[in-house]
Amino acid sequence: MPSSLTIYVDADACPVAIKEILFRTAKRLKIETVLIANGGMRIPDSKFIRIETVPHGADIADNRIIELMQAGDIVITGDIPLASRVVKKSGIAIGTRGELYDDESVHSRLATRDLMEQLRSAGVETGGPRPQNTKDVQAFANQLDKIVTRLLRKSKRKNESK
């Protein structure tokens, strides 16, 4: 029986290893997974996985994700401002390195992001994020599994009490 839970993916910058985990999860647990992207990409043939292509432009994919998602849905993103919007809408934001964003952590990350932006605009070289490694991929897989398991159990209990 398919879940009412939906996973939305900010897909343009989502690493391939993370997408592969999401594809396996969608098929195994029958969870609708929607990739939102500015361009086409290959996805497996599954009634639980689809891609929605949006025009190029600042925040168009982010806006579409926020428009589609409901409270309790999961959004996969490395974009801190999008994660903040997801949390405000009572969604669950998970970073591609396994970070679970809540009200407190997302505000802290936004403050750090803004500080780094100010330093860069002042000419300070700050460097970029380190490349994703297997430990990050494993942390993501563990976090996704923990969150999805909790949500599906909660949904099952809710349905059984009806």
Image (tube, grey):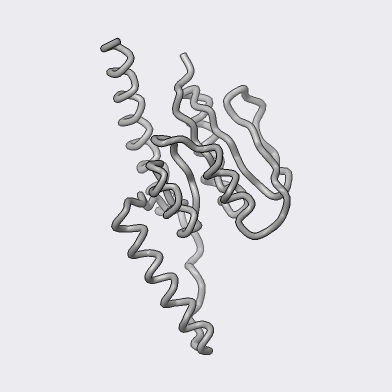
The residue that appears at 44% across and 73% down in the rendered structure is: 114
Query: In which quadrant is the C terminus drawn?
Result: top left
- Residue 105 position in % (x across, y down): 32, 58
Residue that lies at the very extreme toward the bottom in this rendered image: 123
Q: Is residue 147 above or below residue 114?
A: above
Q: How many labels does the image show?
A: 0
46 left or right, relative to 94: right
Of 29 and 55, nearer the camera is 55
43 left or right, relative to 160: right
The residue that appears at 33% across and 65% down in the rendered structure is: 108
The residue that appears at 39% across and 35% down in the rendered structure is: 72
- Residue 52 position in % (x across, y down): 67, 38
96 left or right, relative to 161: right
Q: Is residue 160 above or below residue 53?
A: above
Of 118 and 51, nearer the camera is 118
- Residue 154 position in % (x across, y down): 30, 25
- Residue 33 position in % (x across, y down): 54, 33
The residue that appears at 36% across and 58% down in the rendered structure is: 106
Q: Is residue 129 above or below residue 20?
A: below
113 left or right, relative to 157: right
Q: Quadrant of residue 59?
A: bottom right
